């Protein structure tokens, strides 16, 4: 099943290295070239859900901030999604979707 | 700023806070120390608040991995739904209260009326094998329901081949003496010994009668449950003891439940003894019930009885020529068609009221559904399927209905407990007790579920159809689903209200007509009572006359008493004694075709006391006694029908007098003609002829006494009791009523019917007004922007007002038209309950249309005025 865009961005940001919430927020914004802007409330609701689904985990940190990291399941999901997107990309190339769009 | 976030976090479900709450706060502090931008902070706060709402609504639907394994998933979902529904209802206490009250009234009224309808139309009679029970009457051509004479009953019982058993009942009363020496007249029945076996009802205590109990003077008695409880403490040890009445001792042999009071309101039963005297074939005063042999149909019994009746008629042509037998299932004869009609009428009325309550609640839900569009859209967006949302909304509807149903059932229970105090006396047969039994409870349950589906399905369907895209397109404003549906609902409510108000109007008009009937006498300031003289101390009619004359003397001497009247029975209280008669000097009719007149033994003061005019000749005087010529007064109907073409005064009429040895024919000279009075209630199918004879020339062992007082009759009760006690302190005065109450008894049922239907119609009218008001008010709110634009473009407030009122008028007028059409069709079922009013009475229809139209339009005025006062600047600024 396809991941939702915001989920994908969070998992993608975490795949680089574990992060705390505020850093994650900034990363997502820069990595998506400002396209995905997560407000705190939205971010933490996503985080809570991803934690529930076991895609990410809380990996220590200091007493105030928690560090989040990918779980093996989360990493697998990310790879699946990447593979799916790559497949899609290939298909789109063969169909010359981008070219046409540009032309 | 931190405290804002802390506060907002409190809005999230505990799960969420425990999981990421602290970290969120930390991240916020990081962000805040990074960039102290107020704009950003506001955005964050708004986002957090919105998130809280989403989390709250999403929470029940989310499958938590930790929770998931617990319990049956369907059950868990259901519990979640119920919990959530309860929260939603509690958060809107006003809405919830309104809906529950409407439903409780609807379901309560329906349950209460169902218990009546069930007893009247569906439930078997409370007797053993009730389908075998048959009521038997003696039939004359044109009058199929006559009481039965003792000897005819005896022949029926002994000669038939179709009945397993047969019993006869006669009214009877005893004077019970209290511990304080006060006398109380108690009504009972004298029954043939097989009576209780015919009905198949076992005694609560002791035994019932056996054949050996039937003796010329009864010495055993069976008590009714209510008398046993009220007078004898409900102790089983009463069996075997004896009670004394008028110096005679009766041994109590058993106690019977109230269900066997099928003919009279009997508090006790004594065995009836059939006197074997030839004249006992003439008086018709027994009520007869029989139990068919197994497998025998009523038709076969009818044929069997017809043969017997023919045989008796051949043997005794003088008394039995032309007399036949009527046999009807007991159920039909115990439940009058009037009671059935009334029950169905009330059932229909409360049914409509419930439908209207449902429509109102549906409307409320639809309105709220529009407000909640956002919620549904969000749910849909986070994965709530349409079915899931539908299920949730139906759960809410069912919860509402269950609350309404429970309150309604409590209401019904209260109503039924109080019913005996507000139901008119005699409206329900004595044996019929209304109660909240399992059948009523089951009915209420079914009704609750039905109503939930009725008022819940449409709004739920509407709401679940909401798509996220649609809501977003509208910029998050509420959308207006189902405004057409709502309009139809409002119009139907008006139609239903028109129907009910028309029905109520017809009944009230009929009641008014009844009130205008001239009873033929003046009822005000007259106190009435009945006395019954025991044969032990009053063996001869002459002794009874001494008592009456003593009472008349004592009462006349009592201060505050204006006139004292005595008669066998009171006007409007029913036909009591009918005697055959013929005019002497005219061709004598055959015995069987001899006309009968209502026979009254009255004193000289009777006509004065009740204000009955003597239209010709004179009233009786004190000298019209046994020592003077036998005289009588006839009423206008008798004079017109039988003495036409001659001066009635001085004519001679032969009429049978009451006599312990049997009716004694006697010539009487007519001395006066009295004004017609109503004999059998205010509504009489025919005008009965009456013959009045002086009480001194034919005294009898029972009499009604009427006293016209100077002041309020009710204040005279003690003085009158004292006066009678001075003559014989052991004689009880029964049925103390003012004459107004006697007459009132005749209109009690129509009044009850009209008032009850009227009350429900009023409720219906309010519901309809609220319904149309709600629809219009909501549509005005929704269209504020449109009105703003119109006004900005030059429409004035009058135009807007007209526009809204035009919408309102469309709803109201279509509702009124449909209601009128329905009323034209349905009011015909009222015909049998109306007195001199046509079921399509134009005046009633017209008034109803005007009143309801005006009420509904008035309800629309408020939203219309609000629309006309829309300020374009504000309305458009909202966007």
Image (cartoon, coloured by chain):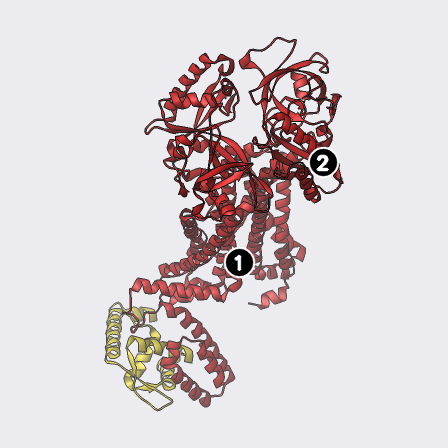
Quadrant placement of the N terminus of chain A: bottom left
Check disc 1 and report its element: helix, strand or loop: helix
Q: Toward which corner of the image does residue B849 lie, by quadrant?
A: top right
Asked if residue B452 is positioned above or below residue B758 in the image, the reply reads below
Query: Could you tell me which residue is drawn at 68 percent across and 13 percent down?
Result: B652
**Residue B518 seen:** no
Quadrant placement of the C terminus of chain A: bottom left
The answer to whether B533 appears left or right of B217 in the picture is right
Chain B image colour: red
* Residue found at the very far bottom of the displayed protein: A62
Query: Could you tell me which residue is drawn at 43 percent across and 43 percent down?
Result: B239
The chain ID associated with circle 1 is: B
Asked if residue A32 is positioned above or below residue B108 in the image, the reply reads below
User: Mark 2 Cα within 10 Å, few/some/many (few <14, many 20+)?
Assistant: some
Q: Which mark is residue B98?
A: 1
Looking at this view, is B332 or B827 the one in front? Answer: B332
Q: Position of residue B766 (x, y in %)?
A: 58, 51
Closer to the camera: disc 1 or disc 2?
2
Q: Which mark is residue B772?
A: none
Check disc 2 and report its element: helix, strand or loop: helix
Looking at this view, is B393 or B518 the one in front? Answer: B518
Asked if residue B493 is positioned above or below residue B81 in the image, the reply reads above
Q: Toward which corner of the image does residue B844 lie, by quadrant?
A: top right
Chain drawn in yellow: A
How many numbered discs, if any? 2
Q: Which mark is residue B554?
A: 2
Q: Position of residue B419 (x, y in %)?
A: 53, 46
The chain ID associated with circle 2 is: B
Q: Position of residue B736 (x, y in %)?
A: 63, 39
Q: Position of residue A91 (x, y in %)?
A: 24, 69
Looking at this view, is B134 or B501 the one in front? Answer: B134
């Amino acid at each position: 099943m396809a991941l939702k865009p915001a989920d994908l961005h969070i998992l993608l940001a975490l795949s680089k290295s574990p992060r705390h919430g505020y850093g994650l927020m900034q990363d997502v914004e820069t990595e998506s070239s400002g396209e995905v802007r997560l407000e705190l409330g939205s971010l933490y609701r996503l985080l809570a859900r991803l934690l529930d689904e076991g895609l990410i985990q809380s990996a220590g940190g200091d007493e105030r901030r928690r560090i989040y990291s990918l779980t093996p399941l989360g990493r697998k999901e990310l790879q699946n999604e990447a593979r799916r997107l790559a497949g899609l990309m290939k298909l789109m190339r063969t169909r010359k979707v981008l070219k046409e769009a540009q032309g | 700023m931190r405290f804002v976030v802390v506060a907002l976090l409190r809005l999230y479900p505990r799960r969420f806070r425990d999981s990421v709450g602290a970290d969120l706060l930390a991240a916020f502090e990081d962000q805040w120390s990074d960039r102290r931008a107020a704009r950003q902070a506001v955005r964050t706060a708004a986002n957090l608040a919105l998130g809280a709402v989403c989390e709250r609504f999403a929470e029940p639907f989310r499958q938590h991995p930790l929770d998931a394994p617990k319990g049956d998933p369907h059950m868990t979902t259901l519990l979640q739904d119920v919990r959530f529904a309860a929260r939603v209802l509690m958060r809107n206490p006003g809405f919830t209260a309104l809906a529950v009250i409407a439903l409780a009234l609807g379901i309560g009224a329906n349950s209460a009326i169902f218990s009546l309808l069930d007893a009247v139309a569906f439930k078997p009679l409370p007797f053993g094998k009730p389908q075998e029970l048959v009521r038997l009457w003696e039939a004359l051509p044109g009058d199929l329901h006559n009481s039965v004479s003792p000897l005819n009953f005896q022949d029926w019982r002994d000669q038939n081949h179709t009945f397993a058993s047969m019993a006869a009942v006669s009214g009877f009363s005893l004077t019970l003496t209290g511990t304080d020496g006060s006398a109380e007249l108690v009504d009972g029945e004298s029954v043939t010994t097989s009576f209780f076996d015919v009905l198949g009802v076992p005694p609560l205590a002791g035994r019932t009668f056996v054949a050996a109990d039937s003796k010329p003077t009864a010495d055993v008695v069976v008590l009714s449950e209510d008398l046993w409880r009220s007078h004898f403490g409900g102790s089983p040890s009463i069996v075997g003891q004896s009670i004394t009445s008028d110096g005679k001792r009766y041994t109590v042999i058993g106690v019977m439940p109230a269900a066997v009071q099928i003919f009279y309101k009997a508090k006790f039963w004594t065995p009836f003894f059939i006197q074997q005297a030839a004249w006992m074939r003439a008086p018709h005063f027994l009520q007869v019930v029989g139990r068919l042999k197994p497998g025998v149909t009523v038709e076969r019994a009818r044929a069997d009885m017809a043969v017997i009746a023919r045989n008796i008629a051949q043997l005794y042509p003088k008394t039995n020529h032309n007399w036949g037998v009527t046999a009807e299932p007991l159920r039909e004869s115990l439940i009058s068609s009037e009671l059935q009609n009334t029950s169905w009428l009330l059932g229909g009325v409360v049914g409509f009221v419930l439908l209207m309550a449902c429509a109102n609640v549906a409307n409320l839900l639809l309105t709220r559904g529009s407000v909640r569009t956002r919620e549904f859209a969000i749910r849909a967006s986070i994965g709530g399927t349409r079915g899931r949302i539908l299920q949730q909304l139906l759960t809410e509807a069912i919860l509402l209905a269950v609350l309404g149903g429970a309150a309604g059932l409590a209401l019904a229970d209260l109503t039924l407990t109080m019913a005996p105090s507000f139901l008119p006396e005699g409206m329900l047969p004595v044996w019929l007790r209304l109660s909240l039994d399992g059948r009523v409870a089951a009915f209420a349950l079914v009704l609750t579920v039905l109503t939930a589906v009725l008022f819940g399905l449409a709004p739920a369907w509407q709401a679940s159809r909401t798509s996220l895209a649609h809501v977003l397109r509208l910029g998050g404003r509420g959308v207006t689903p189902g405004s057409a549906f709502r309009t139809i609902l409002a119009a139907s409510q008006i139609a239903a209200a028109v129907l009910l108000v028309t029905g109520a109007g017809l009944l009230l008009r009929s009641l008014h007509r009844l009130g205008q009937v001239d009873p033929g006498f003046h009822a005000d300031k007259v106190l009435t009572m009945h006395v019954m003289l025991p044969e032990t101390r009053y063996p001869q009619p002459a002794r009874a006359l001494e008592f009456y004359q003593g009472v008349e003397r004592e009462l006349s001497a009592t201060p505050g008493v204006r006139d004292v009247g005595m008669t066998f029975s009171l006007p409007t209280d029913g036909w009591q004694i009918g005697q055959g008669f013929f005019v002497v000097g005219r061709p004598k009719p055959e015995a069987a075709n001899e006309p009968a007149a209502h026979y009254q033994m009255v004193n000289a003061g009777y006509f004065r006391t009740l204000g009955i005019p003597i239209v010709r000749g004179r009233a009786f005087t004190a000298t019209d006694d046994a020592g003077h010529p036998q005289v009588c007064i006839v009423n206008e109907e008798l004079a017109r029908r039988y003495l036409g073409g001659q001066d009635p005064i001085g004519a001679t009429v032969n009429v049978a007098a009451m006599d312990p040895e049997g009716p004694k024919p006697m010539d009487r000279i007519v001395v006066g003609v009295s004004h017609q009075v109503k004999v059998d209630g205010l509504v009489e199918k025919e005008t009965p002829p009456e013959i009045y004879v002086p009480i001194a020339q034919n005294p009898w062992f029972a009499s009604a006494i009427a006293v016209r007082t100077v002041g309020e009759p009710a204040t005279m009760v003690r003085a009158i009791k004292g006066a009678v006690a001075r003559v014989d302190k052991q004689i009880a005065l029964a049925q103390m009523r003012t004459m107004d109450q006697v007459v009132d008894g005749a209109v009690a049922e129509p009044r009850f019917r009209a008032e009850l239907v009227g009350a429900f119609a009023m409720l219906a009218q309010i519901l309809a007004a609220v319904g149309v008001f709600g629809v219009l008010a909501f549509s005005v709110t929704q269209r504020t922007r449109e009105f703003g634009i119109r006004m900005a473009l030059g429409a004035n407030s009058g135009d807007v007002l007209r526009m809204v009122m035009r919408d309102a008028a469309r709803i109201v007028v279509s509702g009124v038209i449909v209601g009128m059409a329905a009323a034209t069709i349905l009011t015909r079922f009222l015909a049998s309950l109306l007195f001199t009013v046509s079921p399509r009475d134009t005046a009633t229809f017209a008034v109803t249309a005007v009143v309801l139209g005006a009420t509904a339009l008035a309800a629309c005025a408020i939203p219309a005025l609000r629309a006309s006062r829309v300020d374009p600047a504000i309305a458009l600024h909202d966007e």
